[in-house]
Image (tube, grey):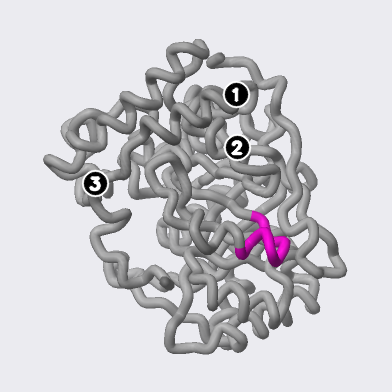
């Protein structure tokens, strides 16, 4: 299952969300570009660019970036990589996580209308494009009413700078209020076999409102591939070394999740990562995961997951066998709107 790509097709985000623009058609699988610039060890722009080009060749047209990645350098990388191929790309980027250029570890959240406008113009310039297909608020600014933030985002749509609007890591109340201000096409949030808390309230709400789901980290930040058994497997500057689910006893406990996924994968002739992605894809046609990678070989393995067909028995087996994860998703969850 590691090289076939015949199953890759398209899905529609926000197909019935009330927008006069209709839904946003994207590739069944997207590509998260964050790790091409930071957080996951050494960056290699040449390999990253080759990965983006290979993705487009395989039909993976939905590319995800953000102004904070780098900061700013990831948008420039993506912009250079898609130059001359813009018509093949559904381009998503985000605003709202503001990092200090002199010390990127210092962050704040800004959802003010003034910042929305200036951030969009800056992203357009860095990306080298005249419009953004899907523009997300990266994190909810709890000091600014969501109606004001989304109202400013709607102005970008009216101006032709943005085609569709999205939110990231938003609570049910925020989603409903935002959607009443302007149709929201997609919610991006973490979702995988080891992060399923959105199933109780958020996923039903998205389906009520006709909003698509774009899961990031569908491979559990690489953990569900089964290739990480110790933080010693990670580069010194890899942020996962400080992630609670990768720490000490938590990591050892969470290996039981990988064991459960691998048991299904072995029976299908697939890799654990492919089964983990296939599980996310099986959650509905309104779900479009964006696994991140900076290497062609992992991209090809991920794309081949679209050919893995999980039966009802496979899905039930995973539901029954995968234990709840140990540890929070981030060291500091205060920026998550709950």
The residue lying at 62 percent from left, 72 percent from top is: 120
Q: Nearer the viewer, mark 1 or mark 2?
A: 1
Quadrant where the C terminus sits is: bottom left
Question: The magenta stretch spans which residues?
Answer: 205-212
Dot 2: what SS? helix
Q: Is residue 110 above or below residue 167?
A: below
The quarter of the displayed image where residue 93 is located: bottom right
Marks 3/1 in contact by CB < 8 Å: the verdict is: no
Alpha carbons under labels 3 and 1: distance apart: 28 Å
**Residue 281 numbered tag:** 2
- Dominant SS of magenta comes to helix
Q: Residues within 10 Å of mark 2 (few under 14, many from 20)?
A: many
- For the question of whether residue 10 can be seen, the reply is yes
Going from N to C along the chain, the mark reached first, 2 or 3, is 2
Dot 1: what SS? loop
The picture places residue 65, in percent across and down from the top left corner, at: 54, 54
**Residue 195 numbered tag:** none
Work out whether residue 8 or residue 318 is closer to the camera in this orientation and state it: 318
| Residue occupied by mark 1 | 311
Marks 2/3 in contact by CB < 8 Å: the verdict is: no
Q: Residues within 10 Å of mark 3 (few under 14, many from 20)?
A: some
**Residue 326 numbered tag:** 3
Alpha carbons under labels 2 and 3: distance apart: 24 Å
């Amino acid at each position: 299952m590691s090289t076939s790509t015949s199953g890759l097709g398209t899905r529609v985000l926000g197909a019935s969300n009330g927008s006069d623009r209709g839904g946003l058609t994207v590739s069944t699988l997207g590509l998260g570009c964050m790790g091409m610039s930071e957080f996951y060890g050494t960056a290699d722009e040449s390999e990253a660019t080759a990965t983006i080009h290979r993705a487009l060749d395989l039909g993976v047209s939905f590319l995800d970036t953000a102004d904070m990645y780098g900061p700013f350098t990831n948008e420039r990388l993506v912009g250079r990589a898609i130059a001359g191929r813009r018509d093949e790309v559904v381009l998503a980027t985000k605003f709202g996580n503001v990092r200090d250029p002199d010390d990127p570890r210092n962050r704040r959240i800004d959802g003010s209308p003034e910042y929305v406008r200036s951030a969009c113009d800056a992203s357009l310039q860095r990306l080298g494009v005249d419009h953004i297909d899907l523009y997300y608020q990266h994190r909810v600014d709890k000091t600014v009413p969501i109606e004001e933030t989304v109202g400013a985002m709607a102005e970008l749509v009216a101006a032709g700078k943005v085609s569709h609007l999205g939110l990231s890591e938003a609570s049910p109340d925020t989603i409903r209020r935002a959607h009443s201000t302007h149709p929201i096409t997609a919610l991006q949030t973490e979702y995988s076999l080891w992060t399923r808390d959105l199933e109780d309230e958020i996923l039903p709400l998205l389906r009520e409102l006709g909003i698509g789901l774009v899961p990031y980290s569908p491979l559990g930040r690489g953990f569900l591939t089964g290739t990480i058994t110790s933080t010693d497997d990670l580069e010194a500057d890899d942020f996962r070394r400080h992630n609670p689910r990768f720490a000490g006893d938590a990591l050892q406990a969470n290996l039981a999740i990988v064991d459960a996924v691998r048991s299904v994968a072995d029976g299908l002739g697939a890799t654990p990562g492919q089964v983990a992605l296939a599980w996310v894809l099986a959650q509905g046609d309104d779900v479009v995961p964006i696994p991140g990678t900076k290497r062609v070989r992992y991209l090809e393995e991920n794309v081949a997951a679209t050919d893995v067909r999980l039966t009802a028995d496979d899905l039930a087996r995973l539901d029954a066998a995968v234990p709840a994860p140990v540890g929070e998703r981030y060291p500091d969850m205060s920026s998550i709107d709950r």
